[in-house]
Amino acid sequence: MYEKVILASIVEREYQIREEAPLIASVFANRLKIGMGLQSCATIEYIITEIQGLPHPVRLYDRDLEIRSDYNTYLWAGLPPSPISNPGLIALNAAFNPAKTNYLYFRLTDSESGAHTFTRSLDEHVSAGRNLTVKRAAGN
């Protein structure tokens, strides 16, 4: 149960649209099943704000993904050692009942609404990032 609470704490910090919480949980559950790192930006933000005591970053950089910490889910596979937030009911429900998907990636593609694009492969994930760049360049 504790591991589900840890997972829910990450989902809590990742989702913005309630319907996406089970999808985000599915990405993490799928990654855990295959031994892939969670690669959650929320855990990096936790390290920066809660462990290092710095202001919340506007953007994460490659150097941030290399911070040596047990909470860095870019460096280590599996869950961090403890929760990174106090998860609410939506995140808890998502962690205990993730959607059944084959997604391994998600990317914020609409910062105004908080919508993510979910993908199955790294190529699709990269392509979603390119589409985001095109949308921004077009003024969307």
Image (cartoon, helix red, strand yellow):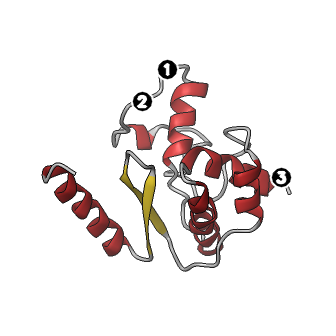
Q: Residue at x 67, y 54 (%)?
A: 79
**Residue 109, quarter of picture:** bottom left
Kind of residue at disc 1: Leu
Badge number at residue 54: 1
C-alpha distance separating marks 1 and 3: 28 Å
Q: Secondary structure at mark 1?
A: loop
Report which residue position mark 3 lands on.
Answer: 2
Q: Residues within 10 Å of mark 1 (few under 14, many from 20)?
A: few
Q: Earlier in the sequence, mark 1 or mark 3?
A: 3
**Is 62 rendered above or below residue 119?**
above
55 left or right of 112?
Answer: right
Q: Residues within 10 Å of mark 2 (few under 14, many from 20)?
A: few
Kind of residue at disc 2: Pro
79 left or right of 121?
Answer: right
- Taking depth in this image into account, of 121 and 77 the one nearest to the observer is 121
- Give the image location of residue 2, x and y in percent: 83, 52
Q: Residue at x 64, y 64 (%)?
A: 22
- Residue found at the very far left of the displayed protein: 138
Report which residue position mark 2 lands on.
Answer: 57
Kind of residue at disc 3: Tyr
Badge number at residue 21: none
Is mark 1 in CB contact (under 8 Å) with mark 2?
A: yes
Q: Residues within 10 Å of mark 3 (few under 14, many from 20)?
A: few
